[in-house]
Amino acid sequence: MPEEKPTLDHEELPTKLGSEFILRFYRLLRGTTIYDRKNVIIDRLTQECLQVIHDIIQSEGQLFLKMVRDNFFFNNIRVQVKADKYPIFKAFWQEMRKRWIGEIEFSKEVNGEQLKDIIYLLSGLEENNESNYLLIKKKLEYRDIDAFEAGKLEFFKDEEIYVDSKDQKKYSKEVYFKSIGLVKEVVDSIHQQKALNIRKAKRLMQNAVNAIMQDESTLLGLANIKNYDEYTFNHSVNVAIYAIALGQRIGIPKNHLSHLGMAGIFHDMGKTKIPKEILNKTGKLSPEEWAMMRSHPLIGTELIMRMKEWGDLSTRMMSAAFEHHLKYDLTGYPRLTQKRRITLFGRIITVADFYDALVRPRVYNRFPYVSEKILGIMLERSGKDFDPGLVKVFISMIGIFPLGTLVLLNSNEMGIVTQIQEDSELIDRPQVCLLYYSDGEYRKGQLVDLREMDEVTRDFKRSIVKTLDPNEYNINVAELLI
Ligand SMILES: [Fe+2]
Ligand SMILES: [Fe+2]
């Protein structure tokens, strides 16, 4: 295969400037949700954003940002998103989308007050209003600001879009439970040796990819809350979700992401051939039983091999099934007679599988590890069991306090983590929904952002002291989170 041409120098600079602008502009936009326009932090964020706008106008003559599907185009060149910047891009994309804004243009430089006018105007737009861009136009005309323009978001026919966050959540939830249904169907089809509706399965995974692109937090939230009893079904779906979300961050194209989802759904199918008594055994497994357990990657591969009509997809699914316990340095199982490199799909599923398997309570693992601990283990075994690059991206994706974590704050309040901070420097300062106790149960209270600073003390208003076990407090996290 021919090698990919190196990027031309003149393309790199604009992309860098474009990324920088998105980062600064988004930070300022997020700032408006916590602080008013006279706040010193807003002043600082405004100055930082003005600086990039200045640099861009000076070197490029214009600043034009357009969103097409899930891509950003900066002055008509597609912006390459690096994995560490991905969460910010995605969050910005979602904020714009919610407001039906698909284009932003600065035709010349603005001053601080003008930029504040623009950003508070954008931030204050109502969700799901198609004519927001006209409203901006009118208001800016009134304020005599002609250097900025916002354009309407373009939607494509094949995109399933929910701009309303409630509808989106409902849809995401539906996709999650339909995927569990799919796993059940797959298991049944294996037991009863009947054919599976491939087209339906593929379509469902495409929907899952769409849902994760638009509403990652609901799906990761569902995967993170471990309060189900049907381990195998949920486990396969969770692995698919983690894998898609991880794949998306490292730039795997959309059509391959749904294949990755299918690989997640199928990775443990070999277990359907292992007796239940062994799968659910609480005591120590005998050497024979262990050998049986360890055969599931191979059995799974054979099962998939029989599904000839799956084409390309079946090769990818086979790799994931075969490789997910092999480990990065090949010291796992099945034992190989010949060294080979583990495929990208195999490496992704390995990371997703390990995390989900450890974090959840199951029969022979009564106490779920706290996520922080598991991520620590993964980091420790990075390069041995796991692909180091993937581990890094995965940890920043899950955060040290994953969605749905019950936390105690130094303000003596209790809350549930509802949003991970996109900025990796603030990974310990997520958004939290406070809980209050009334009529015999915990209820949802105010949403607070742990980045919020106290203006007088110049210290954070609230910080996490420790994580708590929801069962001890009789709290159903799923109900409160989604
Ligand atoms: Fe497995
Ligand atoms: Fe697994």
Image: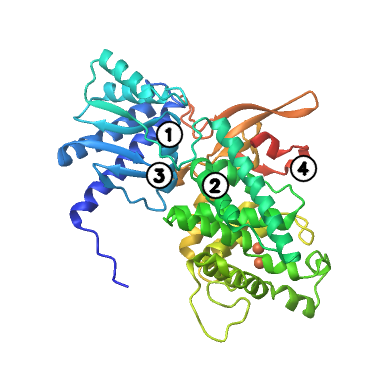
Eye-nearest disc, 1 or 4: 1
Q: Which mark is residue 70?
A: 3
The residue closer to the viewer here, 161 or 466, is: 161
Residue 207: numbered disc: 2
The quarter holding residue 107 reads: top left
Eye-nearest disc, 1 or 2: 2
Any part of residue 479 in sight = yes
Identity, as a three-letter code, of the amino acid under mark 4: Asn
Mark 1, other Cα within 10 Å: few <14 / some 14–19 / many ≥20? many
Q: Earlier in the sequence, mark 4 or mark 2?
A: 2
Quarter of the displayed picture in which ligand 1 can be seen: bottom right
Q: Earlier in the sequence, mark 1 or mark 2?
A: 1
Mark 1 vs 4, N-terminal side: 1
- Measured in 3D between alpha carbons, the distance from the residue under mark 1 to the one under mark 4, in whole angstroms, is 37 Å
Q: Secondary structure at mark 3?
A: loop
State the residue at coordinates (41%, 51%).
Answer: 84
Q: Which residue is denoted by mark 1 in the rendering?
A: 97
Distance between the Cα atoms at labels 4 and 2?
A: 32 Å
Residue appearing at x 25%, y 26% in the figure: 148
140 horizontally vs 410: left or right: left
Lateral position of residue 175 relative to residue 423, left or right = right
Q: Earlier in the sequence, mark 2 or mark 3?
A: 3
Amino acid at pointer 3 = Asp
Residue bearing the label numbered 4: 471
Q: Secondary structure at mark 1?
A: helix
